[in-house]
Amino acid sequence: MSYSYQIAIVGVAALFPGSGDRHGFWKDILAGRDLITEIPSTHWSIADYYDPDPKSPDKIYAKRGAFLNEVAFDPLKNGMPPKIMPVTDTSQILGLVVAQAVLDDALKGQFSEMDRERASVILGVTSGRSF
């Protein structure tokens, strides 16, 4: 049995190092910006985790990476009690931020009028993991 589906992509959003949306991402690409930076002190202590030997257990052997700028998030606006923020994974919060941006892009402020049975957000996430 085969199925045929009609799909329309009507909204797109993304978060990238150096830019908070897809437009900034392409501007950075076209400008040839190098957005690989030193590890911010707000992320972790290089002194605690760095070792130049890649075989050292529980250490990193790089001092640079691509890091997102701070992203604003209002838990109450998203129906979340603020007390659960410390135990909520950052990737879940970023996923909510991007999903909302997709809906904003697609619906141009008409979310309450949308037929929710005919819409979805497909979220793609990638990381530097190797398997």
Image (spheres, rainbow, N blue to C red):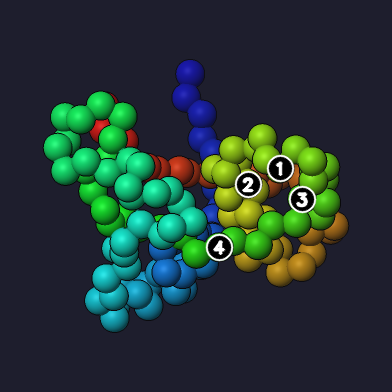
The quarter of the displayed image where residue 59 is located: top left
For the residue pair 22 and 50, the one nearer the viewer reads as: 50
Kind of residue indicated by mark 1: Met
Density class for disc 2 (Cα within 10 Å; few <14, some 14-19, many ≥20) is some
Foreground label between 2 and 4: 4
Q: In the image, which disc is placed on residue 70? A: 4
The span from disc 2 to disc 4 (Cα, nearest Å) is 12 Å
Is the C-beta separation of discs 4 and 3 under 8 Å?
Answer: no
N-terminal label among 1 and 4: 4
Query: CA separation, marks 2 and 1?
Result: 9 Å
Q: Amino acid at mark 2?
A: Ile
Residue drawn at 39 percent across, 43 percent down: 126
At label 3, the amino acid type is: Pro
| Labelled pair 2, 1 in contact (Cβ < 8 Å) | yes
Residue at disc 2, secondary structure: helix
Kindly indicate whether the residue at mark 1 contacts the one at mark 3 (C-beta within 8 angstroms). yes
Return the residue found at the far front: 47
Q: Position of residue 69 (x, y in %)?
A: 50, 64
Nearest the camera: 69 or 24? 69
Q: Helix or strand or loop: what does disc 3 sit on?
A: loop
15 relative position to 11: left or right: left
Residue 93 tag number: 2
Pointer 3 residue: 75
Q: For the residues marked 3 and 1, what is the alpha-carbon distance in whole angstroms? A: 8 Å
**Identity of the amino acid at label 4?**
Glu
**Residue pointed to by mark 1:** 85
Label 2 vs 4, first from the N-terminus:
4
Q: Mark 3 or 1 closer to N-term?
A: 3
Residue at figure coordinates x 65%, y 62% from the top left: 72
